[in-house]
Structures are given as structure tokens and as C-alpha cells.
Amino acid sequence: MVLLAIALLAYTAAARRARRTPRGWNGLRTASFTLGVALLAAALLLPSLTHTAHHDPRVHMLQHLFIGMYAPLALVMAAPLTLGLRTLPATRRRPVARVLRSRPVHVLGHPATALLLDTGVLYLVHLTPLHTAMQTHPPVQALVYLHYLAAGYLFAWSLAGPDPAPRRPGTATRLTTLLLAIAAHSFLAKLLYAHPHTWPPGAAHTALAEEAAQLMYYGGDLAELLLAVALFAGWYRRRSRTPRPLAERGAHAYPGAMFQRH
């Protein structure tokens, strides 16, 4: 709770400073960051969720959706890196820019890498004894949840994040990656629904495991739909800001153009 509160206070303080600049700061970004923090707090700190997640696979799946999909998307759309670059002094912005242009960040932030880290680990957690280890060893559970958050953030940022991402692939590559993620997520949900005993927490509660798989399927679809909306919204904004050649815009864009011949 302390870490989440510090993050929220730091963001809102930076947003307040940014609003005093000529460029300002969109209040919807601040609301998005607040929503992301609230989702994390609900998933990690509410007793009704944390106490029942060990024996109810539906609650565990709800935590996965909050921590790994919805909260990361809300945090990414808040553009915290852009906010930091606007409010930091120039001497501190330059190191951040160098890190963003570095080769490791380029490889790590590629949509294919983000897909492997995000969706690939879901298969590892739900189809191996790692899930059982989460229920019996709190440090393992904490590490898995941390990975959910980091990988989910990386995936959303690599596809549709408004923050700067040098050498980011084109829209076609990112859209293809999103479609692959949808297919992989849906296949895992169907696999868990068809074979509920594959999931250790649902071995003794087949009906609960099937409901958890349905929650993964429909809840994941909604999160990926929101990510697709963010992806196309970013593409539309970039396209609308790109100046077109004069021949494409036509003379109607310049009312005086028809008189320039005379």
C-alpha cells in the first residue's frame, strides 16, 4: 500500500507541475494512472481476494486479469515516461533518452519479446507445478505477480503505449502480435476449460476451474479489445498529424490556390 501510494503521489505531483507549463497535461492521463493503481490495490490488498485466491481458481484468475492485463494497460495509457521527461531537468532527461535508444531496450521492447514474456509465462504458470508453488510459497507468488505486472506493462507499451519508444515496429507488426496474443490466450483458456484437472487449484473443484477458465477467456478478450482500441487510436492520431503532400490534399485545402495561376 505504501509503494502504491508513493507512486500515485509522485505521478499527481508531476502532473500538477506539467499543467503549469505551456503544453499542459491531460487530466485523463492522471485518471488512467489512478485507475491502474486502484486495480492493483484491489487485486493485492483486498482480504476478500487475497485470502480466497489460494483455494478458489476464479479469484486467482481475477487477480491475474487485474495485475497482468487491466492495471498495466491503465498505467501505460497514463504515459508516465512522457510525464517524467517533461518535468525532469535536461541533465536527467538525456540519460533516460540514451536508455530508450539502447539495444537491450529495443530487443526487450519488441512486441515479439513482450508477447513471449507475457503470454508464454501464463502457460508456464498454469500447466506446470509453478502454480502449486505459488499457493504454498508467498515469495514465489510475489515474484509471479511482479512478473505479471512487468510483462503486462511491457506488452501494452510495446503495442500501443503513448510513451516514446524509439525503433518501435510498424502498426502491421504490432497488430499481428496482438492477434497472436489473442489466439494464444484464448487457446489456453479453452485448454483449461476442457481439462480442468490440469490446473492444480481446480483439481478438487472442477466447476470452479471451468468458471475460472471462462473468466480468463472473456476477461482476456475484453482487455485485448481495449488494447486494440488504444493501438488504432494511436495510429489515427499519428496519421492525422502527418502532413500530406499538396497534390493529395487538393486545391480545396487552400482556398487561394485557384487564384495563384492568374
Image (tube, grey):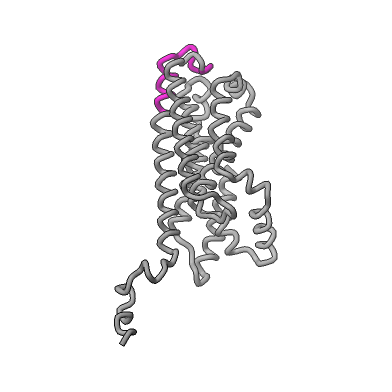
In the image as oriented, which residue stretches furthest toward the front? 261
Q: Examine the rendering and report whether any part of residue 125 can be seen.
A: yes
In the image as oriented, which residue stretches furthest toward the top? 204
Residue name at image x 45 percent, y 26 percent: 187
Q: Quadrant of residue 245?
A: bottom left
Q: Is residue 46 above or below residue 125?
A: below
Quadrant location of the N terminus in the rendered image: top right
Q: Is residue 209 above or below residue 239?
A: above
Find residue 12 and report its horizontal and vertical position in percent: 53, 57
Q: Magenta region, mostly helix, strand or loop?
A: helix
Find residue 11 and report its horizontal and vertical position in percent: 55, 55
Q: Examine the rendering and report whether any part of residue 37 can be seen.
A: no
Quick check: is 23 in the magenta stretch?
Answer: no
Quick check: is 201 in the magenta stretch?
Answer: yes
Q: Is residue 44 above or below residue 127?
A: below
Residue name at image x 40 percent, y 62 percent: 240
Residue name at image x 49 percent, y 69 percent: 23
Q: Is residue 223 above or below residue 167?
A: above
Find residue 136 and report its horizontal and vertical position in percent: 61, 21
Task: Specify the segment rendered in magenta.
Answer: 199-216
Residue name at image x 42 percent, y 44 percent: 228
Find residue 17 and report its horizontal and vertical position in percent: 55, 65
